[in-house]
Amino acid sequence: MKKQLARPMIVGGIIGGVVIGTLAVVLTLILTKSPVDPTTPTSSQSISGKIICAPKKPGNAVTTDCTYGLQTDAGKKYLLYAAKFPDDVSIQRYPTGTSVTVTGITSSDKQPVYDVDGTIMATDVRAR
């Protein structure tokens, strides 16, 4: 009799764990959404430039961490984000100053902290 009761409890525990795990992943993805505003018109394109630490706007705390950006050959600056989760694009493999071509979804969204012309949700980054 005890074995018959234990089996449904084990199966119920496994199913409950899977449901809770799935909910945790979904909530994490929802709460860590991209900083690119989905209502802003965007386009996919390739842009060449150099990897930089994105400059902060005056009045923001200066820190030692580097938020990756791209300064184009024309002087425009963009924040770089990886489009895939986890970071399959590996923007960090290129040190600042590296000449690259970034392919991705661009947006002209202004950022509250960084002095940039927009953002790029990178789908590919290649040294040039």
Image (tube, helix red, strand yellow):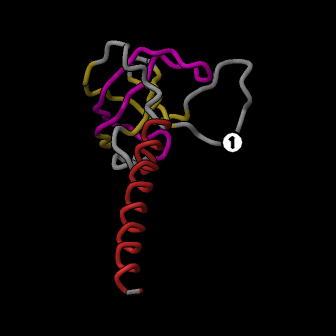
Please state which of residues 23 and 128 is positioned toward the viewer in this rendering: 23
Percent x, y of residue 108: 41, 14
Q: Is residue 86 above or below residue 51?
A: below
The boundaries of the magenta stretch are: 95-123
Quadrant of the rendered structure where residue 128 is? top left
Quadrant of the rendered structure where residue 99 is? top left
Percent x, y of residue 94: 43, 47
Residue at the image position 55 percent from the left and 30 percent from the top: 54
Residue at the image position 38 percent from the left and 60 percent from the top: 18
Q: Horizontally, is 47 left or right of 115 in the view? A: left
| Image quarter hosting the N terminus | bottom left
Number of marks in the rendered image:
1
Q: Is residue 6 above or below residue 121?
A: below
Give the residue type that dot 1 points to. Answer: Thr
Please state which of residues 86 and 53 is positioned toward the viewer in this rendering: 86
Q: Is residue 44 above or below residue 127?
A: above
